[in-house]
Image (cartoon, rainbow, N blue to C red):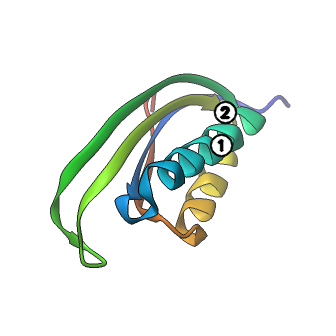
Amino acid sequence: MPTVKGSYEAVFIFSTKLGEEGVAEIKEKFRSLIEQNSEIGEVDDWGTRKLAYPINDETDGDYVLYNFVSGPAFPAELERVGKITDGVLRSMTVRKDA
């Protein structure tokens, strides 16, 4: 039985304390992870924005929206990696065509 693929989007908020180079590296890390495990679509870099509330004493974050198509197991792995990676303030992955 073939794996059913779904369309997903993941929003990541990266710490601006990493500096410009650090933020660029972590954005590329997650882009590479998504490319290796799914069909990546549009990547929308929203840049630095003020957070609605402080997270870890930070008031700004660098936002990126990744769109991708994958099987059902990969989004959970992406969330797991996001939770254990230093420099990720928050992340959320949702299925778009549910």
Residue beneath the point at 77% across and 36% down: 36
Residue under circle 2? Answer: 70
The amino acid at mark 2 is: Ser
Of residue 84 and residue 76, the one placed in the foreground of this image is: 84
Where is residue 20 shown, x and y percent of the image?
A: 44, 49
Q: CA distance from mark 2 to mark 1?
A: 7 Å
Of residue 71 and residue 40, the one placed in the foreground of this image is: 40
Describe the element under mark 2 as helix, strand or loop.
Answer: strand
Looking at this rendering, what residue extends furthest in the bottom direction? Answer: 57
Quadrant placement of the C terminus: top left
Quick check: 24 above or below 9? below
Residue beneath the point at 65% across and 43% down: 72
Check whether the beta carbons of the residues at disc 2 and disc 1 lie within 8 A of each other.
Answer: yes
Quick check: 69 above or below 16? above
Q: Quadrant of residue 69?
A: top right
Q: Quadrant of residue 46?
A: top left
Left/right placement of residue 3 relative to residue 43 reads right
Left/right placement of residue 52 relative to residue 31 reads left
Quadrant placement of the N terminus: top right
The label nearer to you, 2 versus 1, is 2
Describe the element under mark 1 as helix, strand or loop.
Answer: loop
- Which labelled disc corresponds to residue 72? 1
Where is residue 64 shown, x and y percent of the image?
A: 41, 40
Looking at this rendering, what residue extends furthest in the top direction? Answer: 42
Of residue 45 and residue 38, the one placed in the foreground of this image is: 45
Where is residue 29 shown, x and y percent of the image?
A: 65, 47
Where is residue 22 shown, x and y percent of the image?
A: 52, 55
The amino acid at mark 1 is: Pro
Residue beneath the point at 48% across and 51% down: 23
Quick check: 24 above or below 40? below
